[in-house]
Image: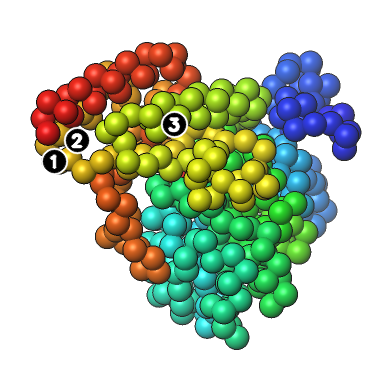
Amino acid sequence: MRKNPNHGPATRLVHAGRDPSQQHGFVNTPIYRGSTVLYPTYDAIKHRRGRYNYGTSATPTMDALTEAWTELAGAAGTVVTPSGLAALTVALMAAVSAGDHLLVTDSAYRPTRQFCDGVLARFGVETTYYDPTVGAGIAELMRENTRAVLVEAPGSQSFEMQDVPAIAEVVHGRGGTVIMDNTWATPLLFPPHERGVDIAVEAGTKYLSGGSDLLIGLTSANAKHFPAVRRTFDHFAMCAGAEDIFLALRGMRTMNLRLREHGRAGLEMARWLQGRPEVLRVLHPALPDDPGHAIWKRDFSGASGLFGVILKPCPEAALAAMLDGLELFGMGFSWGGFESLVIPFDCAPYRTATSWAPGGWGLRFHIGLEDTADLKADLDAGFTRLKAAS
Ligand SMILES: *Cc1c(COP(=O)(O)O)cnc(C)c1O
């Protein structure tokens, strides 16, 4: 592995985490499957000598991905977990203990909330949700026992931006930990640790995979917080499968290229949707009139392919007619793959710190790698069905 701190992120994605000279010249790190690791001597097993001890804690395949991600994210270390949600639970369990208070953005990925309100509450951690646009105002929400603040930008479904550096400054001043769900941007578009995040989570299921064919998560942390993350990962044995890690490494090599195309096509589609008479609002921080645009422009180096749309009011049957006839846009959860997706969404039932009343049906789009002309034609036909059924 030739490590050069001056290499750019695109070069790192290609070269990090593999060493052909150690694998008979083959380009990729092979899949090491296994539980047992044999020790050569009594002394070696007594003192657990050697890099590898047991399949749950580390394998060369696991190391290839965690080392590469650590480099990419600018972290001190990374663990790889069997899903993005598992990566979030490792981050949270590493940061809080019984009796602590946790602040979570009201725009967080919904299963994150369910974990906080379910598991963390059961173990004596109290969670309060806050307005994602709070910025330095987070200071007023912090209590004596506030141990961690979870941010996510842009927000799941609703796409509000957050002033992460401002929040981090306040939280660090009070000795707290900043956890971020950075799935939308990946470290390529938002270097989390450089911006003040202590523990960053990536659902690798999305853009790292790029293929809608695996579930994986990554939790990276700075030097202060990595030991706790690593310990938590070990205590839960939250290890991912070897084949999935291999596929994630494969996805990583092309992630930069794919992400740029998702971002370009996504913005083109967002602009096109903004011009449609059926659309009330487009939620995309790279659009100049988006409320979060200034923060996005300051802190992010690009956009991915996921954004939201609020339709002008129409009957539910008209919405159904639009969605049911789509040929290219699949309807299903998750995103980040090569194919375009759309889901209806409504944040109103679960928001607690802010209200959600956008004035029409919400649709979340993931723009895949198809020709945008075909995607527009598919949606155009959808809008024709919507009008006919209105
Ligand atoms: C999908 C997603 C996750 C969870 O990832 P899984 O691998 O599906 O568990 C976490 N955060 C965000 C923002 C996501 O979109």
Against 216, residue 232 (above or below) is below
Q: Please name whichever residue, 194 or 200, is drawn nearer the observer in this view of the structure.
A: 194
Does the CB distance between marks 3 and 1 fall below 8 Å?
no
Q: Quadrant of residue 381?
A: top left
Q: Amino acid at mark 2?
A: Leu
Residue 376, image quadrant: top left
- Give the amino acid at mark 1: Pro
Compare residues 263 and 204 and report the one nearer the observer: 263
Q: Secondary structure at mark 3?
A: helix
CA gap, disc 1 and disc 2: 7 Å
Q: Percent x, y for residue 36?
A: 62, 43
Q: Are marks 1 and 2 in contact (CB under 8 Å)?
A: yes
Residue placed at 57% from the left, 83% from the top? 143
Q: Which residue is mark 2?
A: 319
**Which three-letter amino acid code belongs to the residue tagged 3?**
Ala
Q: Disc 3 and disc 2: Cα gap in Å?
A: 19 Å
Disc number for residue 270:
3
Residue at the far bottom in the pictured view: 144
Say few, some or many: other residues with alpha carbon within 10 Å of mark 1 (under 14 / 14 to 19 / 20 or more). Answer: some
What's the residue at 46%, 73% (across, down)?
Answer: 127
